[in-house]
Image (cartoon, helix red, strand yellow):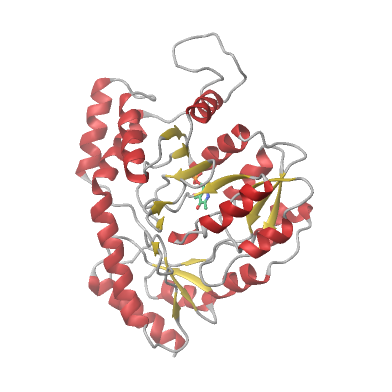
Amino acid sequence: MNYIPQIEPWIDQEELKELSEVIASTFITENRKTDEFLEGIKALTGAPYAIATSNGTLALVAALIASDIGPGDKVIVPDLTFIASSNAVRLVGATPIFCDVDRQTGCMDIESVERLIGQGVQGIMPVHLYGQIVDMDQLMALADARGLVVIEDAAEALGVTMNGRHAGTFGRFGTFSFFANKTITCGEGGVVLCNTEADYKLLYRIKNHGRDRKGVFVHDGVGYNFCFTDLQAAVGVAQLRKFGTIMQGKRRVFEQYRKAFQGVNGVTFMEPPANVSSNYWFMNVLVDDPAGLNAHLEKNGIGSRRFFYPLYAQPCNQDLQEPEQPNSQWLYEHGLSLPSGARLPEADIARVCDIVMEFVR
Ligand SMILES: Cc1ncc(COP(=O)(O)O)c(C=O)c1O
């Protein structure tokens, strides 16, 4: 029987064709293909400005530096997220402090954020987890009232909207990842969205050796090299053309799981709230024994992933001495991501559901 991976990119001849053209052009570093990719991202998200970075982690680092966050500052980060969210804060010399999450969405709980605002907190990093989105109207009202900068980690949220507005366009900065497991991929890659030309220029300098354009050797500031390549952009441009088809595929897979798990004791299928249009990045269930189910699925040739490990408990964060966050811990102890590829055949999804039900019965 075929192995069913938890996730796989939808890449084929279309990406190869774009890539061949870029290689033939000999312009392989950040150039016109990158501009084309960024135009596509702006059209999709409605953001006025976008810059490309080497990956999503460095997109966060660039946004934090542009927000002037550094040593002595604290940034509120949800306890349940991929490690890059808190690593980015630590890498600029600031301290992440962890808030709890909402059990229904897995995203930052706004009351928990409110309790942490105070001494030394300069920023908030909402993470739009697994295809869900933080209630950004509520969060922005809170942040604006308290004068805090908001950097949205929308790494997993391309295609997610709330009340029609795209994730990553609410805060001062919004970042995306194009790692191979994301809705669309460039292999590696990142984007930062922002709203003003001033912020765009600031970001561009940070990621381009402290200068406003390439090809000159007078540098106004000290900067990094977080640049993208036209090789990544070639893949990204082909992926953007498939975006609608990928989203349709994800929706189909989501609906099949939703129907199959309806009324099944012992499995809760996670669904987005009514005002959210999800990208169904990962199809998640809550069960009593996710470790056992993960092993049982693997034994049957099916890939799955445990939820992210809570940040407060991460070995690399023990020096922060952060307290346990109950909902984050609970979700870790119950959550499992099932095969979520946009091209999953109906029969494979049915097989996954059968094996899940066999385990929980
Ligand atoms: C929530 C979140 N933030 C940040 C990142 C980092 O992105 P990248 O892997 O492109 O560095 C990822 C995923 O990889 C992520 O899932």
Report the residue at 28% width, 50% height from top: 243
Q: Say if residue 181 shows up in the picture.
A: no
Using the image, determine if residue 296 lies above or below residue 321.
below
Using the image, determine if residue 71 lies above or below residue 207.
below
Q: Is residue 351 left or right of residue 116?
A: left
Report the residue at 75% width, 63% height from top: 323
Using the image, determine if residue 195 lies above or below residue 26.
below
Q: Say if residue 276 shows up in the picture.
A: yes
Report the residue at 56% width, 72% height from top: 103
Rendered-image quadrant of the N terminus? bottom left
Nearer to us in this view, 212 or 156 = 212
Residue 231 screen position, x and y as percent? 34, 31
Rendered-image quadrant of the C terminus? bottom left
Q: Is residue 141 left or right of residue 54?
A: right
Nearer to us in this view, 277 or 252 = 277
Residue 321 screen position, x and y as percent? 79, 57
Using the image, determine if residue 230 lies above or below residue 216.
below
Quadrant location of residue 291?
bottom right
Report the residue at 45% width, 82% height from top: 267
Residue 268 screen position, x and y as percent? 46, 80
Nearer to us in this view, 124 or 57 = 124
Q: Is residue 242 left or right of residue 124?
A: left
Marker count (numbered): 0
